[in-house]
Amino acid sequence: MQTQTENQAETQWVAALDAEARGLVAAVDAQPDASRLLDGTLDQAGYIHYLIQTYHYARWSTPILAEAGHRLKRLGRHPELAELLIQKGEEERGHERWLLADLKNLGCPAAQVEAAARSPAVDAYTGWNFFTSRAGVPAAVLGTAYVLEYLSQTRAGVWAERLRAVAAIPNIHKSVTFLRNHGALDGDHVAEMARILGRLTDPEEQAAILFSARVARLVYPCIFREGGAASIPLAR
Ligand SMILES: [Fe+2]
Ligand SMILES: [Fe+2]
């Protein structure tokens, strides 16, 4: 049986995580290309840039999550969070293939995607999350997952719908698999994470999760073209 004070502490900590997630949505909406995703008017080059950069971090989601989960298990701490990380690693498996399929339908073959330059934001994102997964506080990866899935439940489905409705990009109706599937799945994923994370009372672990959520909030919005269509392409 929990006391009211314990319940309040749990609610407060998940509310802090939600505040980071809402901050991420606001920061993304403020990016010129992301605002064009929201009204459906993004041009082909901007959408391709976004999908390629997404591919370059999403391809690592399963190893980052799974390694964090298995390491947490080996450390013998927070078994419920270890299981959640392993489960989320499985949930993410193969999502990079949706990106490759969407890009192919936009005329961008896999070889071109693989050869494309990664944005500094993608390197920062994968570098930080591989660090926490393999050497830092492994549960911190859940902070990243939480805010990105929150963004996804709030925006991915809407972006897919608007892109299709405006149809400014040739073949767009065959090129929104990644967005459409995430919009459909991630609402439940966020609710499940909030329920499990609400039971976490360790302040150090909470701080590490919040810290990674904050890193994602700062880094992720920079995967879009800087300044929108006026930006200089990334150099390799
Ligand atoms: Fe995914
Ligand atoms: Fe998800």
Image (cartoon, helix red, strand yellow):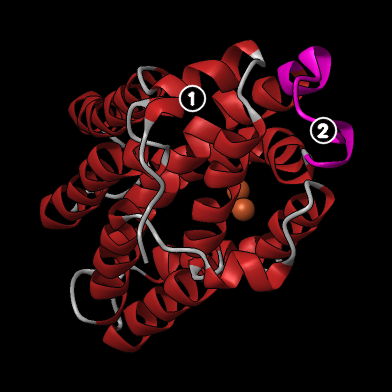
| Residue 202 position within the rendered picture, expressed as x and y whole percent measured from the top left | 17, 54
Some atom of ligand 1 lies within 8 Å of the CB belonging to the residue at label 2: no
- Looking at marks 2 and 1 on the same chain, the residue that comes earlier in the sequence is marked by 1
Q: Which three-letter amino acid code belongs to the residue tagged 1?
A: Ala
Q: Nearer the viewer, residue 8 or 28?
A: 28
Magenta range is 162-175
On screen, residue 129 versus residue 161, left or right, reads left
Q: Is residue 224 magenta?
A: no
| Residue 30 position within the rendered picture, expressed as x and y whole percent measured from the top left | 35, 17
In the rendered image, which quarter is residue 71 located in?
Answer: bottom left
Q: Which mark is residue 172?
A: 2
Label 1, on which residue? 34
| Residue 170 position within the rendered picture, expressed as x and y whole percent measured from the top left | 83, 32
On screen, residue 132 versus residue 59, left or right, reads left
C-alpha gap between disc 2 and disc 1: 16 Å
How many marks overall?
Answer: 2
Contact between labelled residues 1 and 2, with CB atoms less than 8 Å apart = no
Q: Residues within 10 Å of mark 1 (few under 14, many from 20)?
A: many
Residue at image point 73% right, 27% down: 160
Residue at image point 14% right, 48% down: 207
Asked which secondary structure carries label 2, the reply is: helix
Q: Which three-letter amino acid code belongs to the residue tagged 2?
A: Ile
Q: Quadrant of the C terminus?
A: bottom left
Residue at image point 49% right, 77% down: 63
Residue 68 seen in the figure: yes
Vertical order, 153 against 220 (above or below): above
Q: Quadrant of the N terminus?
A: top left
Asked which secondary structure carries label 1, the reply is: helix
Residue 191 seen in the figure: no
Q: Is residue 171 magenta?
A: yes
